[in-house]
Amino acid sequence: MDGSQGELFEAAPETVAAPRASRASGPAHLEPWAVRRFLAENPNFLRADEALLTELGLRLDGGNVVDFGPAALARVHAAHQREAEMRQLLEDTARANFAAQAQIHGAVVDLLDAHSHADLAARVDDLARARFGLRAAVIALESDDTTPDGWRRLVPGQVDLILGGPQRQAFMGFQPTALGLFGAAKDEIRSLAMVRMALWSAESEALLAFGCSDPERFSPEMGAELVAFLARVVERTVERWPRA
């Protein structure tokens, strides 16, 4: 047997000290592969260091094999719990979105059955209460003249004021400047969903606004896609009749 074979099969010592950096040169940076190689070549280093095993959450079983300890098992359990909670959250969100879409589809059918401006406004308010559990909903139009029965009249520029600027197409959350849209119910409104509309022409600014007594129902973090979809339905439905 030559020298290289003797070195290959030479028994490892019972304990081997980990390489240390010289004090003069400062702490050494060890690559993960170097640490792994050192532990593989010196298995007794880890087995003999009880303090290190405890710090890592490991322990030796009766057969002198490193086993997972309570700390390691607790980390695995916590990771599994987080994964289960995230999966449940995704499932709940998907079910809520599906239910909301089903309600929106039913609301569209109701709106398309309207036969006048006033009937459309009444249907918007009814679906807000009956289908979505909200306090009220209104159609508001900027106008220097009268507006259809059941609609709210706004002065020119008021849509921008309510939404927070000419570039804002929608608003989700609480907006004090919009409370007047809801008449006698204004003191009960704690959160709103509003979308800008253009009725009959691009220059005719209008709003579709939903109000709720629950302050958590609408928030700035929410998307306004479904409310905007209803606003587009209202725009198309209004075009059936000439402006009053």
Image (tube, grey):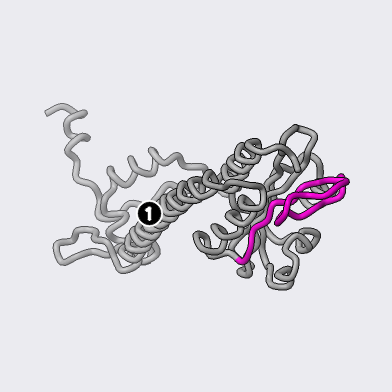
Residue 165 in the magenta stretch? The answer is: no
Front residue of 80 and 223: 223
> For this view, does 177 lie left or right of residue 108?
right
Seen at 40% across and 64% down, the residue is 55
> For this view, does 116 lie left or right of residue 95?
right
Whether residue 24 appears in this view of the structure is no
Q: Amino acid at mark 1?
A: Glu
> For this view, does 138 lie left or right of residue 143?
left
Front residue of 49 and 87: 87
Residue 145 in the magenta stretch? The answer is: yes
Q: Which residue is mark 1?
A: 91
Seen at 24% across and 58% down, the residue is 66
Q: Is residue 73 above or below residue 21?
A: below
Residue 191 picture quarter: bottom right
Give the x, y percent position of residue 220: 66, 54
Q: Which residues are magenta?
A: 135-156
Look at the image and tell me in which quarter the N terminus lies.
Answer: top left
